[in-house]
Image: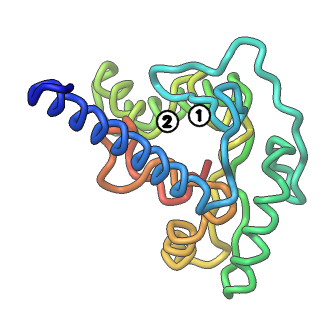
Amino acid sequence: MVNKQTGKKIVLSLVVVILIFAAAAFCGAQVRCGRYTPNDQDDWRLTLVNADHSVPDGYAPTLLTLSNGEQVDERIYPDLQRMFDDARAAGLSLFVRAGYRTEDAQEKIMEDRVDALLREGWPEKAARKEARRTVAQPGHSEHELGLAVDINSHTSDEWPLYAWLAEHAWQYGFILRYPQGKEAVTGYAYEPWHIR
């Protein structure tokens, strides 16, 4: 016979187990809504690179060169091309402004940004801190993975393109990596063109 206290513990345990299974099912459904369902922790799509996590040692993407000379990891190309085809069908004119970068290229971009701020009169320390809001440190850029692209429009009004990307990129396995209002989370300024 189960006493009242033990009965309450059993019921509470069952409720917790049910909630855990319900949450897992919900989260799984959310991931499966798009095309991508990760199968393990070593999945290349889950490689985290940011200010706190550097490009893994020995990481070497197999690059594919786009028609404009930019390069991307060949694994993202089919989905990137589908996204571009559908964006063009929606009346948008777009291109990859930046794809894969070497660590040296990232270093040059950082130094160019710091130099520009110094020319504006920023003190050195403040210029470097400000530059890190919009430019990743070398070795810490998603572009060094070949999995991120900066997408721009051939027209002067890029906002319709950015709105389309924000709404549709997930359907092709991409995300808007640095969304507006999430600067404190991502560590970077809003970049409506940066898709990962």
Q: Amino acid at mark 2?
A: Val
- Residue beneath the point at 78% across and 59% down: 79
Query: What's the mark number on residue 109?
Result: 1
In x, y percent, where is residue 127? 35, 28
Q: Quadrant of the N terminus?
A: top left
Which of 59/4 is in front? 4
Quarter holding residue 68: bottom right
Rendered residue at 85%/58% (across/down): 78
128 above or below 154?
A: above
Query: In terms of sequence position, does the residue under pointer 2 or pointer 1 come before the other?
Result: 1
Q: Which mark is residue 135?
A: 2
**Residue at the image position 51 percent from the left and 66 percent from the top:** 166
Q: Nearer the viewer, mark 2 or mark 1?
A: 2
Q: Would residue 33 be found to the left or right of residue 81 on screen?
A: left
From the viewer's side, name the closer residue of 191 and 3: 3
Give me the residue at 15% from left, 33% from top. Answer: 8
Q: In what element is the residue under mark 1?
A: helix
Q: Which secondary structure, mark 2?
A: loop
Q: Find out whether the residues at labels 2 and 1 contact each other: C-beta distance under 8 Å.
A: yes
* Three-letter code, disc 1: Ile
